Amino acid sequence: MRIAIVGAGFSGTSLTIELLRRGPVGVEVLLLERSGLFGPGLAYSSGDPNHLLNVRASNMSALADDPGHFVRWLQAHAANQGLGATVPASGHAFAPRGLYGRYLSETLAAVEAQAAPGRTVRRLPLDIRSLEIHAEGVRLHPAGAVPLDVDAAVLAVGNFPPELPVTEGCAACDASLIIRNPWDEAALARIAPDAPVIILGSGLTMVDLVIRLDARGHRGPIRVVSRRGLIPQQHRETAPWPSFIDPEAPPQTVAALMRRVRSEVERAEASGAGWRDVIDALRPATQAIWQGFDAVERRRFLRHVRPWWDIHRHRMSPEIAARIAHHLASGRLVVEAARGVRLDARDAGLALGVRPRGSSRLEWREATYLINCSGPQSDYRRVQDPLVASLLREGVARPDPLGQGLDVTPHNAIVAADGTAHSCLFGIGPVSKGQFWEIVAVPDIRRQTAALADTLADRIA
């Protein structure tokens, strides 16, 4: 059986590892990655040692059945990275992203070397532009190369760049001063050390960007604008808290969920624990909670709860939080609760027109550069990607009704425009966010890829 995996970041690499470990004899994996980076992906290719993971090492194993794998690897390698004293047995440490990318590449290579005869992987630096389903499986069409025929294909394309949330007035501004993609290193290199910067969005992407600007020697003022002005909370070492929601009978409404969580936080704090323990205890039930909501409740969650959920669930490492706190205290970094509504050109750069939260008054904020950190684009109807556009145009796939990736079944099968679930086309990672919600972090994705590897193995058997 030949299986193509489109995308070689964590999702694609994790599935490849699981297929090599547990797949049947005769499975050939084609790992396809347009960038040619097999393992690290965009998220873990940073060369800046100050660019840390936002998840503690104890939760970052690439192997679903060996949760301590990354901690052991880190302890074995950390001395050469100057990290030896910061990797306790508990795994409460936050490694550099680039080092984690190296771990993924080395783990894939090690698993490949140890794979049973007949389990193979081919790494192909190809950009898949379209695909078609036929009676024998899937035909993939790469740019500038011959088509590939496979028995099954898996979309592991990761996150897409954010869409600029402010468009009015853009045409009047110098386009080089508006950095639409916060991962565009060439664009960031243009920013002068003292240049004032406005950042749209206040989540972890903003946090990462501020740290990367620091690494480039930037010392100018930074103004962060987001609708609620909320920034991620800080990680602290937590203690296990008992599960308090049954995945088999989760709350059916957002209101019921929030009542239960608030009650549990009060109970935890009264016993000397904290809200972090409670939030972490939710993880095993999070996907069941989301799947138990109907469309109305899911929309309610996205509109009213998501901003608070994100800052408490997806937290900063203590080291990064300390740096952000320093910038806030010094006044170099300012976070404003406001909505950006329009842009205007200025002699020194540009101005962002904002309406502060709770006000209808238009105010102007000036800077040299505007950087979009509003979060990955998850509405695939608006994604500027040839493969995604082709899938939707040809009816091979359809968007999630709430704009959270593609429509995917609970078993990861892509759903066609006519509502039919494909038997040979699957989606993992952020592609499947509409079905699982919490499917962007390593612990959730590795469980997903292990399950899909078993599904594919059963098909061969």
Image: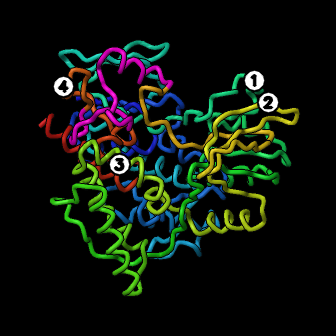
Residue 192 in picture, x, y percent from top left: 84, 43
Q: Amino acid at mark 4?
A: Thr
The reply to whether the magenta stretch includes residue 394 is yes
Q: Secondary structure at mark 1?
A: helix
Label 4: how many Cα within 10 Å (few below 14, some 14–19, many 20+): few
Q: From the image, which quarter does the N terminus lie in?
A: top left
Q: Which residues are magenta?
A: 384-413
Which of the two labelled residues, at mark 4 and mark 3, occupies the earlier sequence position? Answer: 3
Q: Which residue is mark 1?
A: 172
Q: CA distance from mark 4 to mark 3?
A: 28 Å
Secondary structure predominantly adopted by residues drawn in magenta? loop
Q: Which residue is mark 4?
A: 420
Which of the two labelled residues, at mark 3 and mark 2, occupies the earlier sequence position? Answer: 3
Q: CA distance from mark 4 to mark 1?
A: 46 Å
Which of the two labelled residues, at mark 4 and mark 1, occupies the earlier sequence position? Answer: 1
Residue 372 in picture, x, y percent from top left: 63, 39
Which of label 4 and label 3 is nearer to you? 3
Residue 454 in picture, x, y percent from top left: 20, 44
Q: Which residue occupies the extreme left position in the image?
A: 461
Position above or below: 177 against 148: below
Q: Which residue is mark 3?
A: 300
Visible residue check, residue 270: yes
In which image quadrant can residue 387 be found? top left
Visible residue check, residue 18: no
Which of label 2 and label 4 is nearer to you? 2
Q: Which residue is mark 2?
A: 345
Q: CA distance from mark 2 to mark 4?
A: 49 Å
Residue 452 in picture, x, y percent from top left: 24, 42
Q: Amino acid at mark 2?
A: Ala
Q: Amino acid at mark 3?
A: Arg
